[in-house]
Every structure is written in structure tokens, then in C-alpha cells.
Image: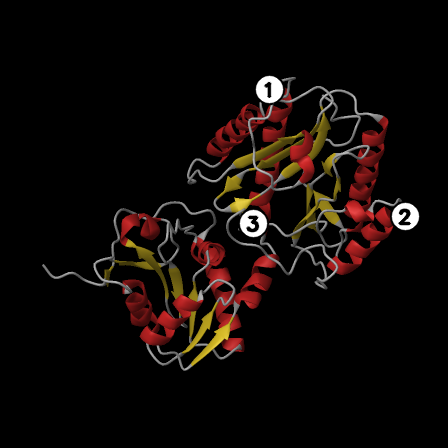
């Protein structure tokens, strides 16, 4: 039996993708403009977020390599045989399946589509040193150019269709928050409360997006000392009366991430906790008012910093005040050029989608100990911003 290195495996018919074909054509036209501007013949995209953004297919790596090869005339998804026809069905473009009967068949497929000795654009923040050696060996590029920053800039401004999907995600995050609030009770475990929110969101996603793939939706629900970090995983800790709580819902729809994050208390907070909470809410309100076109990420950050410093709270700030939304998750993607931090000079423009999420962490042993965080999603408009998060925040709404 002859064993090919790669072959087309067009099993089944194309299915409904997250966006219309015209959306993917527009994205690819933007990528080709990036290529033309840098005199690039072939783009090799290997990250989950870029492959999904330009093709519609969100891969599951599991130790294997995936890519989208784009030339002036072709766009071909290169996927592993273990996925059979799924990449073909869920891609806007053509696809080749590489086999694992010989090592490096992925790179043979890339060379077949892109051709040898050409100028190649790569994502240097994703392509490993080992993969770069394979690229040199099998493709022998005449020149290699990093296009990761340019593709990130393209993704940072969301289309109307993307904004509609993100709005739907924000509404589903609110649904998860409502389910979590209803499940909060003395001595309930974090894991049980989190599962109530996750199940509510997955049910809502399946109802709203019947053609989607369902994966990756999750909840971080933290209590007491576990609230000190924004990304602390769920535990089996039992909630105690007087606990500070952190509600975090993350619905994932077609690879697009949205989020809701809220501070709550199980019972009335003590005066020190209430003062910290109210200060963080005030910083949150200020931050939302600053989200508008023409403002820089660094400038917004400096104003919130000054607000907290005047209240002797800046030293308790945990991280930046917000970030971009789109194709990202806790294990792939991030539009690092659109984060509300001191070292990011990006200027906001209409179509960008950012969070406002100040967090203060007071160490154990101090009055008001715990992590306080609020999080809303805002779409930058022509003259301001639209807040698409509906779940209430602050002491009047979030004492259970």
C-alpha cells in the first residue's frame, strides 16, 4: 500500500461557519494586503487564533501541528489525519490532511502549497525554534518576515458581524452570572456554584447557536482567600458567611471569548471591606467613562492610577485595567497591543472591543482582605462606547 504524506480528505459537506463567506474573504484580503506591504509571497499561520480568524476552523492541537498557508491565489488549511473531515467541513477554504506515517509530513504539505525558496511570513510569537528549523529545512525560504503584530492589528478592529457575536456572548455571560448568584449559599462548594453557571451558559449557547461546536465555556468562582488572583481555578472550598466572592463567567462561542466578573459578599461586608469595594467600583465607573475613540491605552491607565493613588490604593492594583476581545481564550490568543497598561500606546478607535476591569487585592491579615474585581465589556463607537454587559455591580446589587 502506498502511503501518502498528505491528501485532500473532503468528507461530507461544508457546514455553517460562524460568519458569512464574505467575512472570511474580507479577512483574507486584509492578510494579503499585509503580505503585499511586506513583499511576502506566502503566509504560514500556525496559531489557534489566526487559523480560526482567517479560516473559521479552531483546531485542537494535542501535540500536533496545524497551519493555514496563504498565497496570492490560494488559502489551504493543513490539518492532522486524526481530525478526518472536520477541518474541511468547518473551513472557509480548501484543506489538506497530512498523515502520521512519516515524521514531518506537515512540513511536506506546507512546502507543497507554498513552494520552495519564497519569501514567507510567519508568527514569530508562536512558531517554536524547532518548527523554525523545520521551515528552513523543508521550505527553504528566501526570506522570513514576522507578521504576528500586523495580523494582531487587523484582528483588533471588529467587524459588525463580530460585534454582534460578542454582544450575544456578553448576554450569555450575564445568564451565567444569574445562575451563579442563585446557587450561592452558606457552605455550598465553589465547584458546585461554578457548575451551575457553566451549565446555564452552555444551554444558552446551544439554543442561540445551534450550528456551533460546543467547547471551552468555563467559570472561575472564587471565595475568601481564593479571590486574591483573577485566574485562580475553582476549588472545593465551602462558602462561609461573611466571605468575599468573585464571580467570573466565560462563555466561548466559535472561539470568541466574552466575560463577566463581579465582586459579591455572602452577607453584609464589614466596614473596611465595604470601603475597598466602593473605591474599586468608583475606579470602574471612572474607567468606563474614559473608553472612547482617540484615547490611548496608556492615558486611560494613568488616569485610573492617579485616582487610586489619591486614595492610597494604587499599591494594591493587581494587573492592567482591561484588554481586547475577539478570538482568544485562557490557552490561546491575546491581542496584546490593545491592553489598558502603562506601556501600551495604542489609540482607541471605533470597532475595537475592550474590557474595563480594575482589581484591588488586599493581602490576608489586613482589614478588607481579598480580591475586588468588576468587569464590563465596551464596544468603542464613533463618539464614545457602548457597554454590553448587563449584570449589576456594587454593594447595592451584589450582597447575597
Look at the image and tell me whether residue 84 can be seen: no
Mark sitting on residue 188? 1
Asked if disc 1 and disc 2 are in contact, CB closer than 8 Å, the reply is no
Residue that mark 3 sits on? 162
Q: Nearer the viewer, residue 259 or 372?
A: 372
Compared to residue 117, the image places residue 55 above or below, namely above
Label located before the other in sequence (3 or 1): 3
Q: Label 3 vs label 2: CA separation?
A: 39 Å
Q: Label 3 vs label 1: CA separation?
A: 37 Å
Label located before the other in sequence (1 or 2): 1
> Which structural element holds mark 2?
loop
Residue that mark 2 sits on? 310
Q: Nearer the viewer, residue 250 or 41?
A: 250
* Quadrant location of the N terminus in the rendered image: bottom left
Are there few (<14), some (14-19), or many (20+) residues within 10 Å of tag 3? many
Does residue 8 appear left or right of residue 252 in this picture?
left
Look at the image and tell me whether residue 18 can be seen: yes
> Which structural element holds mark 3?
helix
Farthest residue to the front: give it: 365
User: Residue 317: x percent and y percent?
Assistant: 76, 47
Q: Nearer the viewer, residue 25 or 270?
A: 270
Does residue 141 appear left or right of residue 395 in this picture?
left
User: Residue 313: x percent and y percent?
Assistant: 83, 44
Farthest residue to the left: give it: 1
Mark sitting on residue 320? none
Are there few (<14), some (14-19), or many (20+) residues within 10 Å of tag 1? some
Q: Which residue occupies 69% across, 49% down?
A: 322
Q: Which residue occupies 47% across, 63% down?
A: 28
Amino acid at each position: 500500500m502506498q502511503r501518502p504524506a498528505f491528501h485532500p480528505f473532503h468528507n461530507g459537506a461544508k457546514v455553517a461557519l460562524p460568519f458569512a463567506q464574505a467575512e472570511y474573504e474580507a479577512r483574507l484580503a486584509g492578510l494579503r494586503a499585509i503580505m503585499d506591504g511586506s513583499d511576502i509571497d506566502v503566509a504560514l499561520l500556525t496559531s489557534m487564533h489566526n487559523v480560526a480568524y482567517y479560516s473559521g476552523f479552531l483546531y485542537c492541537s494535542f501535540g500536533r501541528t496545524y497551519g493555514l498557508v496563504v498565497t496570492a491565489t490560494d488559502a489551504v488549511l493543513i490539518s492532522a489525519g486524526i481530525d478526518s473531515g472536520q477541518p474541511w467541513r468547518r473551513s472557509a477554504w480548501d484543506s489538506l490532511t497530512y498523515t502520521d506515517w512519516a515524521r514531518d509530513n506537515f512540513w511536506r504539505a506546507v512546502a507543497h502549497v507554498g513552494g520552495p525558496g519564497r519569501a514567507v511570513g510567519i508568527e514569530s510569537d508562536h512558531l517554536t525554534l524547532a518548527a523554525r528549523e523545520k521551515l528552513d529545512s523543508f521550505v527553504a525560504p528566501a526570506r522570513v518576515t514576522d507578521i504576528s503584530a500586523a495580523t494582531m492589528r487587523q484582528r483588533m478592529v471588529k467587524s459588525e458581524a463580530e460585534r454582534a457575536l460578542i454582544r450575544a456572548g456578553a448576554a450569555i455571560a450575564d445568564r451565567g452570572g444569574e445562575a451563579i448568584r442563585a446557587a450561592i449559599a452558606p457552605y455550598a462548594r465553589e465547584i458546585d456554584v461554578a457548575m451551575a453557571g457553566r451549565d446555564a451558559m452552555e444551554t444558552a449557547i446551544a439554543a442561540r447557536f445551534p450550528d456551533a461546536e460546543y467547547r471551552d465555556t468555563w467559570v472561575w468562582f472564587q471565595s475568601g482567600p481564593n479571590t486574591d488572583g483573577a485566574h485562580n481555578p475553582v476549588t472545593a472550598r465551602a462558602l462561609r458567611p461573611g466571605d468575599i466572592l468573585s464571580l467570573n463567567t466565560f462563555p466561548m462561542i466559535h472561539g470568541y471569548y466574552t466575560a463577566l466578573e463581579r465582586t459579591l459578599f455572602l452577607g453584609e461586608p464589614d466596614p473596611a471591606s465595604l470601603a475597598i469595594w466602593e473605591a474599586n467600583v468608583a475606579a470602574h465607573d471612572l474607567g468606563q467613562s474614559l473608553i472612547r475613540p482617540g484615547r490611548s491605552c496608556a492615558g486611560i491607565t494613568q488616569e485610573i492610577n492617579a485616582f487610586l493613588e489619591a486614595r492610597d490604593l494604587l499599591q494594591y492594583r493587581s494587573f492592567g485595567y482591561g484588554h481586547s476581545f475577539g478570538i482568544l481564550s485562557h490557552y490561546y490568543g491575546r491581542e496584546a497591543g490593545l491592553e489598558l497598561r502603562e506601556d501600551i500606546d495604542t489609540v482607541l478607535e471605533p470597532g475595537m472591543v475592550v474590557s474595563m476591569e480594575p482589581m484591588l487585592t488586599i493581602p490576608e491579615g489586613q482589614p478588607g482582605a481579598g480580591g475586588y474585581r468588576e468587569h464590563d465589556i465596551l464596544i468603542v463607537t464613533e463618539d464614545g462606547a457602548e457597554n454590553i454587559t448587563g449584570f449589576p455591580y456594587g454593594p447595592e446589587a451584589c450582597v447575597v
